Amino acid sequence: MRLLLLAFLMVLVTAWAISTPKDHPYRVLDPDSRDCNMRIGENGNYASPAWNILAAYGNAENEAALKDAAGRWDTRFQCAIQRHEVPGPTPDANKRSNALGYTLAFLEFKEDGEPFELIKDAHQLFTMNELTDRVSYIERSEWKPITQLEALNAHLRSVEKRTHTDELGNVVKHSNYVIVFVHGWRHDASIGDGNVTDLRAYAAHVARYLRDRCNAGESEHCGREVTAAYVGWRGARLNETRLHLPFIALGNTVGALLDGDASQCSNGVLPSEKPLCWKNWINSWGDSLASGVATLTLFDRKPVSEYIAPHALMALRKIEQVLNKQPGTKAKQRDNPNKMIVIGHSLGGNMLATALKDHLIKAVRNHPGANAYFYPPLGDLVVLINPAAEASKWTDVQRAVWEKIAFFEGEGDLMAGHRFFPAHQSPVVISVTSAYSWPPGGIRPADCAIAMHDKLSLLGPDMNSPDEICARYTQFLEAKKPGEFIFHDETPNPDERACGALRTPFALDQAVENIDRKKKIGIKSDLATYLAFPLFRGDLRPLGAMIAGAARDLRAACESFEIPANRRDQRALSFWQRVGEFVSDLPFQNTDIESSRTIGHLDPPRSSVSLVDTYRMPARQLGTTHEIRSIGWAPPNQAPYEQIASDPSLDCPVSHDWLARARRATPPFGTQWESASLAPPLDLDPANPRGGGSHPAVEMTHGFRLAGMLPITRANDPFWNMRAYDDVLMSHGGFMFSSFICAINQFVMDRPTRWPPPSTPAELQSAPMPQEPNRPAADAPKVRGRAR
């Protein structure tokens, strides 16, 4: 007991000693100051060139400030407005620069939600007389900014004043592409913060995508400038770097002696079968210590994020107004050249979910249905990444939709439910969470029986398609030995029915093998929202389930249902199961899963009578709705900052019409659409004479693959709650994979759905009469129940 008390006191003292200052701004230096030199001329152009210093130092502010002290970067990085550039390859044949330019702006808030004022220089505030002089003009348009928000809006207005002449002599007007990033727990706007580094990489990626689209003939992108707005608050109450630095120094020393060739060991970031380097292993000790101490701060940082939420929303509404995207103009947004995507990570996602929940519920209740378009609540798209928010902040919105739509016979007009949102509806709010288990609810013994792994192995290794397995099956029957069989009723001459019956076992067997493959290198899910958040809310059941499954999860998915042959393994399995059950059964827990689980970790329950090839509507139609994964299980790619301008692997394909084609590929309503399976290209779009596009950068599914349940939303529902594989979104902070950055921005850069002709308002478009669905083939998955 004394040791526990001593350890607790040491944690408290450590937390006090490394606490960050309260209500301290980091990026409030006036853009017009000598160090920033970001004055805007009458033509909208800046007086000084963009900075490319970070491309030389791997996007690391602290390193650039340390190694280039003469450049005063420790001061210049405090500017509220910064213009950066990533040098690119030599100009092309048309003498177009391939460098990537973007602007980085900051909006910081005090813990009571108040904004920060700009300062004159790094060590001097403006006097009251100087502040008065900045706003003493009769014309408000002549006022100079006092706050970070005013400086950002002045920049956005200046962009629309700019023009340039292209190689054909045409005058191109400029417009804005704004990426708002609201950081979360254990981050702030300090120099060197990892989320600021991440946002710069996001901005460079988007600048690359817009440049490539312009060069490909998408002229609407040619004058579009990227501005990344970082919403900062005191999400980091502890300076974890102070705890981490001794371990970094020790790791560098030991690593230099023992690691040898660093290419032969894992860096601990990307999944790998290689062992950890000593350097990274020791560094992870420091990270674990810092994480353990910082976990205590979740209790007070979450309420702060919720208190700031309405203040941050008002600031973002002002940006909308400058971009002419305020709610009263939403119907004209398709013709608005300005674009805006709002991203919230962790408690930043909680901030956005808190700010928007009541608005979304009211908007759904007031939505007229009948194919009326549901417009985004903020900007063009809101994306929540691993949101540390109660599931109720999402399920309350789902209930509002559920009250408007009939899902079962006897509840109302089923057809009207499919027309509540139009066929050309795009998502307006997307939540993406790195999931803990696959599929939702995990693997059952019946699933393993249907997969027939042992029997399929008789057909040989490395089968890649259903057609190949059918050919192997025919060869197997011709040469099989006595007693070998796959189907009990097989005949000497297999027909297409037998081959078709192998498709589901083959698909499930591949899915189970993929899960096992990921287990071997470690599935990196978001444990902060899966485990730490329920603990914070008083729910120990996820921890108990993880402990109970510790020994089982080390084995292959379908082997975990069998009793281990080794008695030592049997005792270990029994011990951990008992510990897990004890933790799960502790009294006085919070058993309300909508308040103790996060948005992305509340899955709809799979029916107790469903097989994986039998799709039934879940009894509780709340929780996650979609899946997202890499294309063909491709490994994740994260390019260095300095290579973003030229790395060919970062190409982001134009993806016009992909969502419309995916829905059309699964008639009559698009239910269970797959982005990997698109209908043929649509007719030429007058709004896009260059034609359609290709698939998105990742694979997305309406509902879940091989999970034994129907999607709980309609195919055109605008609220997507996505379970992500770790090859797209890894752990809590692994949102930097290029395919993911491309995919979420494709919703804004491109036109994923085909709108009706403008001659008829979208609100008056009548839904086409549903066609009689095609009779399913003999080997098609069975859909049971009366839902839909």
Image (spheres, rainbow, N blue to C red):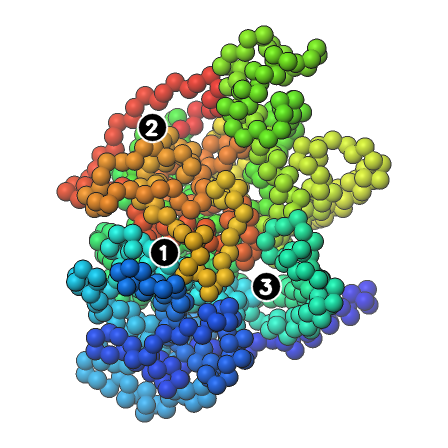
Q: Which residue is mark 1?
A: 209
Check the image and report above or below for 662 versus 599: above
Q: CA distance from mark 3 to mark 1?
A: 39 Å
Callout 2: helix, strand or loop? loop
State yes or no: discs 1 and 2 in contact (Cβ < 8 Å): no
Q: Secondary structure at mark 1?
A: helix
Q: Earlier in the sequence, mark 3 or mark 1?
A: 1
Residue 434 visible in the shown view:
no
Q: Is residue 785 above or below residue 271?
A: above
Nearer to the camera, 486 or 230: 486
Q: Quadrant of the C terminus?
A: top left
**Residue plotted at (55% across, 69% down):** 236
Residue 671: numbered disc: none
Foreground of the two, 374 or 571: 571
Q: Residue furthest left?
A: 759
Residue 104, how many percent across, how many down?
39, 70
Three-letter residue code for mark 2: Pro
Using residue 751 as the reference point, say whether residue 357 is left or right of it. Answer: right
Q: In whole angstroms, how far apart are the C-alphas of marks 1 and 2?
A: 34 Å
Residue 21 spot, x, y in % from top left: 55, 78
| Circle 2 residues within 10 Å: few <14, some 14–19, many ≥20 | some
The residue indicated by pointer 2 is: 668
Task: Tell how many labels.
Answer: 3
Which residue bears the numbered disc 3?
A: 299
Q: Nearer the viewer, mark 3 or mark 2?
A: 2
Q: Position of residue 765 (x, y in %)?
A: 21, 37
Residue, far right: 567
- Which circle, 3 or 1, is nearer the viewer? 1
What's the residue type where badge 1 is placed? Tyr
Q: Nearer the viewer, mark 1 or mark 2?
A: 1
Kind of residue indicated by mark 3: Phe
